[in-house]
Amino acid sequence: MAIELKMPALSPTMEEGTLAKWLVKAGDTVKSGDILAEIETDKATMEFESIDEGVIGAILVPEGTEGVKVGTVIATISGEGEDAAPAAAPKVEAPATAPAATAPPPAQPRAEDPAVPAGTNMKTSTVREALRDAMAEEMRRDERVFVMGEEVAQYQGAYKVTQGLLDEFGPKRVIDTPITEYGFAGIGVGAAMGGLRPIVEFMTFNFAMQAIDHVINSAAKTNYMSGGQMRCPVVFRGPNAAASRVGAQHSQNYGPWYASVPGLIVIAPYDAADAKGLLKAAIRSDDPVVFLENELVYGRSFELPELDDHVLPIGKARIMREGSDVTIVSYSIGVGLALEAAETLAGEGIEAEVLDLRTLRPLDREAVLASLAKTNRLVIAEEGWPVCSIASEIMAICMEDGFDHLDAPVLRVCDEDVPLPYAANLEKAAIIDAPRIVAAVKKVCYR
Amino acid sequence: MAKSGSSRKAPAKAAADDETFALRSLQEAHEANPRYAASDDELLKFYEQMLLIRRFEEKAGQLYGLGLIGGFCHLYIGQEAVAVGLQSALEEGKDSVITGYRDHGHMLAYGIDPKVIMAELTGRGAGISKGKGGSMHMFSTEHKFYGGHGIVGAQVPLGAGLAFAHRYNEDGGLCMAYFGDGAANQGQVYEAFNMAALWNLPVIFVVENNGYAMGTAVTRGSAETHFHRRGTAFRIPGMSVNGMDVLEVRAAAEVAVAHVRSGRGPVLMELQTYRYRGHSMSDPAKYRTREEVQEMRDNRDPIDGAKAELLKRGVTEERLKEIEKQIRSKVNEAADFAENSPEPEMTELYTDVLVESY
């Protein structure tokens, strides 16, 4: 029974090639691994090996022939019975799948924040304490949760966010790492793949750039690439964006970078209640989460409901202030500036609605569009660069799905498009502030 | 500054002063007893597993040539004794395995069904990753096989993380983390070595030194070509092992596994091996001679070696022919399955991006 040898594809793009040289002739006995021919592609000359045993029958395409299409029968081998099994001459065509019209599943309505029962005691908490309490509560609740990072244990946290955790949970669960972000991010992801629930603290997200391969290639993509087998429930957290006078390498907002990656959850809260409720949700999530904090907000105090289990829904924006004239969309530290701007604007007779996105991926487009439908004017305030930003994304959403509601062009107020300078006056000039938000709002209100 | 929870002493002034700095002990143990005393049945099993990998990979190469497999496809032909010898010393379902993108052999050595592997290569819905991963991205959490990773070296810290989980859970398991001589030059490998040694993680780092990082010979890419010595800076004992003899590989694995299981931290094994085929399918093989490849095939082949030993032990030619026949038919079945299974449903485009709904 003869086996047909076909012109092979030797690269992902090859369609035809030159049969440069035959290294066997009719009547030769060949075995698996013997080189039969040399084939030239547009890139290189490649060797063509036998995977069968037998005797070369006929050479059907002589050497020197150019333009031999992939799949053309070039020779035959007469083999033993079992070698001529059906798979020896498979059909080239893959079964056709009709390119059926397909679309992403429609977004489900998102859960509202759970109502805080009447009479709940409110306490004042800093964002720093709220984050620590979130971790501590989740570590008490689930043995698989642990924290690792630089200076998280004995030093009590470079920014004191992990203060007291070592004392309560011990060195098995609160782990100081060497300064090797790529390595410990990988170890954290591997531990999550192995069934644990790591919280990986980056001293700042600037240093996470060393580790971004594991955040994206190892954590975000693996569930998809494995057809849903490989869970990676890791939380990467730490301060993000500009601090104060630390220069360009320590002052970048990575929100837009991570928010562009399918497979990641990206959260950037502003106040203490959201920081706590969303970090608890992040730790419980079965998906990898990038949790972006802000050093300048750590020490600010907010009201926080005293509840046994304060968990908030991921993916839900929050109206921080109601208004009817214009919407200011923001997140993280920008929310404080937007609220400040709204106060000023109220004094001038403009009622601004302030929407805190809280989660950057998945983005709550419905909340953005609902507020736009109400106010018909929208400004985005983002402490970060303007190009390819969250602001750009919000503007796209308004164009795609909110065009009919717009009474003015959407404007964005972002940092200047420069690396952050050190000098106090230049730094101040580079970063957004409330007056710039006020000016943009007046512009869209034609005031 | 002393670390709590760490038993390590302050660094010694010099290695010579440090009596615990005995990094050749595992190598010496291996050399004292270099070949595993396999029973006939065990050797037959190794032979079968290696032959399955060889025939599977040849078939994958053929299907690639026919356009049924796309993209990158890295074949394990020549290196079979490494995965088979090492993984035979592990406990499947307890010990985890992770590797790079040349991963078909490690999966077959862990008993994963060739059909679902081949169907993944052809991008079908019945593939082990539902056709969404491809040759480089395959996983089986059921078998504790954790991939299948496409970024050179990334699997090394991931493997240390899996080992971290074994230790954290006190489940007695270890992780075997494979990488190549090319990946051995990645910085993150040494970050992982440092933490694995610092934290005494139960991990066996395995460098499969097949001589070439893609097309760059080790001597052209590595200042220290004795990869097993590269753990020295982290106090990780090293072993250099003939990766072309499955019994030597198995014997070395026993030494390494015993060391790690006893709680003494990581081991770095270097397996001297050779890949007969190109780095991937589109490899012009201009960086080595045909004679060099032929020499390895003729004189060092792990499957021929095992076959000769089986014949010497009195296993009949007929028995081996029968095994060969069964494997060919198993591989042909896998190829038929992979060719005839439908492509993934279009709805699969949007599934598995996230686990939960938000």
Image (cartoon, helix red, strand yellow):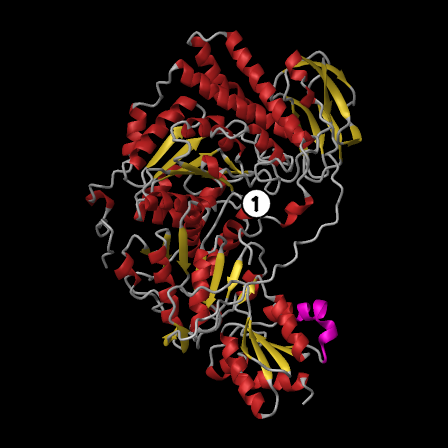
Identify the residue at image location x=49%, y=75%.
A333
Q: From what the image shows, is residue A216 above or below residue B310?
A: below
B235 left or right of A119 in image: left
Membership of A401 in magenta stretch: yes
Q: Which quadrant would residue A60 be assigned to in this image?
A: top right
In terms of image quadrants, where is residue A357?
A: bottom right
Image quarter (top left, top right, bottom left or bottom right) of the C terminus of chain A: bottom right
Q: Which residue is mark 1?
A: A225
Q: Residue furthest front?
A: A118
Residue type pointed to by label 1: Met
Which residue of the protein is positioned furthest toward the bottom in this rendering?
A348
Q: Going by the image, does B276 lie left or right of A308?
A: right
**Residue A54 on image: x %, y %:** 66, 13
Q: Residue at x 67, y 85 (%)?
A: A445
In the image, residue B293 lies at what x, y percent? Answer: 55, 26
Please name the residue shown 60% across and 72% down the image: A386
Give the residues drawn in magenta, as a range: A395-407
- Height in image: A260 above or below B353? below
The dominant secondary structure in magenta is helix
Check if residue B72 falls in the magenta segment. no
| Residue drawn where x is 76% and y is 42% of the image | A98
Note whether residue B236 is visible.
yes
Is residue A358 shown above or below A149? below
Numbered disc total: 1
Towards the viewer: B82 or B148: B148
